[in-house]
Amino acid sequence: MIIKEAKFVISNSDVRKCPEGDVPEYAFIGRSNVGKSSLINMLTGRKGLAMTSASPGKTMLINHFLINGEWYLVDLPGYGYAQRSKESREELRRMIESYVLKRRQMTNLFVLVDSRHKPQKIDVEFITWLGEHGVPFSIVFTKLDKIGVNVGKDNIARYKQTLLEFWEELPPIFGTSSVDNRGRDEILDYIEQINRSLKEQ
């Protein structure tokens, strides 16, 4: 897929105010500081589309970007940022759950995981929760440029092994780097493939 146009449409904290219509939405979520904004900018080829920051936990809203006039890329708030107040964390949890479970246009949720770390309890719990609720999702490993090729393979294999303790079958998995564009074509082709099948229905 070639991205010819990527434009910001709306930010809000209420799923009821998200764009109307039947345009498919592909949402991106992950723990704070997982490299979500950098990945979104890399996928769209627009450097400043999603705001990147050295401080984790900056995305506090549901952000919609219209891609090629055909589908929405949705930037969701990160989860698990401990330095937020309990009240703020609860508010974000409600916002995320409301979007993920109630938004019928949500076609696929890309769950971002930092490839440098061993399986984190919070990620495994979130992925398990998605499975329990029948949410269509994929796993995207980020920051592969920051570790050696073999270390990256080992870490991803360890993650798969952990998930297979709870799952019979794994969702689609992508390895990425926003520095060298690794995984870009694979993710965009996957989205294009789903869009094509939706049109054929």
Image (cartoon, rainbow, N blue to C red):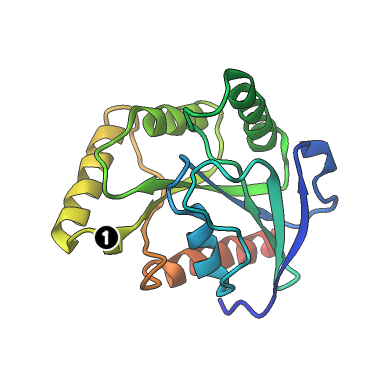
Q: Residue at x 63, y 19 (%)?
A: 87
Q: Position of residue 69 (x, y in %)?
A: 76, 70
Q: Position of residue 73 (x, y in %)?
A: 64, 58
Describe residue 17's horizontal placement relative to residue 75 as left or right: right
> Which quadrant of the structure image shows residue 186?
bottom left
Q: Residue at x 52, y 34 (%)?
A: 79
Q: Position of residue 88 (x, y in %)?
A: 63, 26
Q: Nearer the viewer, residue 169 or 108?
A: 108
Q: Compared with residue 25, is residue 84 higher up or lower down, i.e. above or below?
A: above
Q: Nearer the viewer, residue 157 or 6?
A: 6
Q: Compared with residue 188, is residue 132 higher up or lower down, i.e. above or below?
A: above
Q: Compared with residue 148, is residue 135 higher up or lower down, i.e. above or below?
A: above
Q: Where is the N terminus found, in terms of image quarters? A: bottom right
Helix, strand or loop at disc 1? helix
Report crowding for label 1: few under 14, some 14 to 19, many 20 or more residues within 10 A (C-alpha): few
> Which quadrant of the structure image shows residue 26?
bottom right
Describe residue 177's horizontal placement relative to residue 95 as left or right: left
Q: Amino acid at mark 1?
A: Lys
Residue at the limit of the structure toward the top, as seen here: 86
Q: Position of residue 25 (x, y in %)?
A: 67, 53
Q: Residue at x 68, y 64 (%)?
A: 200
Q: Compared with residue 13, is residue 70 higher up or lower down, i.e. above or below?
A: below
Describe residue 186's horizontal placement relative to residue 143 as left or right: right
Residue bearing the label numbered 1: 146
Q: Nearer the viewer, residue 68 or 167?
A: 68
